[in-house]
Each structure stands twice: as structure tokens, then as C-alpha cells.
Image: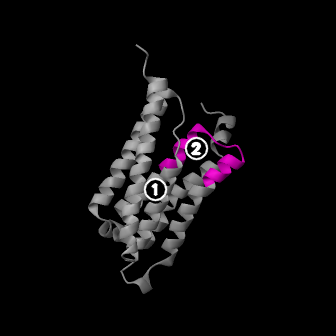
Amino acid sequence: MPTVASIKKLLTAANLISVARAFMLFPIVYLLNTWEGGLAEFPMWAVFWIIMAMFSDYLDGWFARSYHEVSRFGKFLDPLADKIVIFGVLFFAKPISRAIPGWFVAFIILRELFIFGLGYMVSKESKRDMQANRSGKLSIFLTSITFILIIFELNPWADYLLYLTVFVGSISFLFYMKRYYHLYQVDVKKPS
């Protein structure tokens, strides 16, 4: 049974910000789905919530480092909150799901599932924390900006950023795989 001290360790400012980010999905999707089209009618509150979600991704890390609240649970929760927002917008916000190319959706889904799934398995076996790297954070940031540019049909910049996002996402994927391979070799694989 969880103790008060163990619950207190989970209820850090950084973790609460991560949870709040996951819940920001609801106003973002709702506001985007009320939009009938046309730039003049765009719900600017949706942009506010998207920016808040992006800013909270920076803020939770800052709180965790500044107040020494870095934890195994927080390192799991932060990327999970990112994925909830990204996948939720991809699947439930109609203006996004209609405008984003299918190959890009497949790229994001496969990349995130591999990173999260393999990371979870390796960290579970190695007893080391899953952790986002800087290129992964940059990839999430670029994905969010790409969504905004595509919604506003700001071409050719939306197309340029789309390909830049795929490039950075691919590089970050390779960094994650290198780290997981290293952890597997050092911590998991038994010497023969």
C-alpha cells in the first residue's frame, strides 16, 4: 500500500505539469473541431493551448532539474504526456487528421511506438530510467509547429518543416536506438 511519503514523491511540480499537459489535449481537440475553416474564424484559443502544451514540456523539465525532483516516474510520465497530446491531436482533431499526410502520421506512430516500447523493455530489464534526449524534445517541438503551419496552410513553409521534422525525428530515433542497444549490451545481455 502506498505511503504518504511515496505519494508525496510522485506529486512533484514537474509531474503535475506533465499530467496537466496530457489534459491540455481536451481543449485543443475541442477547439480545433469547432473550426469550420477559414483563417479569420480560426479559434485562437487552440493556438494558446498548443503553445501552453509546448511550454509545459520545457517547464516540467526545468522544475525537475531546478528543484531536484528528477525521478524514474517523472522520466516515464513526461514522454507519455507528449505522446498523449501528439496522438490525441493526430487522431481526434479533424482539421489535423484531414490535413496531415498519411505517411507522416505513420512515421510518427511507428517512431513513437518503437522508442517508447523498446525504451520501456530495456529500462525494465536494465533498471535504468527511460529518458528523453534533446533531439527527441526537438522532434516533438517541430511536430507541434508543423501542425500549426499545416492548419494555417502556410506553404511552402509547412512542407519544409514537415520534411525537417522527419529528418530530425529520424536522427533522434537513431540516437534512442544507439542508447537502447548500449544499455542492452551493458546491463541486459548476459556474458557467455
Above or below 155: residue 175: above
Residue at far right of view: 67
Q: Position of residue 93 (x, y in %)?
A: 38, 66
Marks 1 and 2, the one that precedes in the sequence: 2
Residue 28 visible in the displayed image: yes
Residue interval drawn in magenta: 60-80
Residue drawn at (49%, 24%) of the image: 187
Residue drawn at (41%, 39%) of the image: 177
Q: Are the two marked residues, 1 and 2, in contact with CB atoms closer than 8 angstroms?
A: no
Of residue 24 and residue 60, the one placed in the foreground of this image is 60
| Relative side of 112 to 79, left or right | left
Amino acid type, residue under disc 2 in the picture: Gly
Q: Residues within 10 Å of mark 1 (few under 14, many from 20)?
A: many
Label 1 or label 2, whichever lies nearer to me, is 1
The stretch drawn in magenta includes residue 68: yes
Residue at far top of view: 192
Residue drawn at (49%, 27%) of the image: 126
Q: Residues within 10 Å of mark 2 (few under 14, many from 20)?
A: many
The residue beneath circle 2 is: 74
- Is label 2 in a helix, a strand or a loop? helix
Amino acid type, residue under disc 1 in the picture: Ser
Residue at far left of view: 102
The residue beneath circle 1 is: 139
- Is label 1 in a helix, a strand or a loop? helix
Above or below 184: residue 41: below
Above or below 182: residue 73: below
Q: Position of residue 40 (x, y in %)?
A: 43, 86
| Relative side of 74 to 32, left or right | right
Residue 81 visible in the displayed image: no
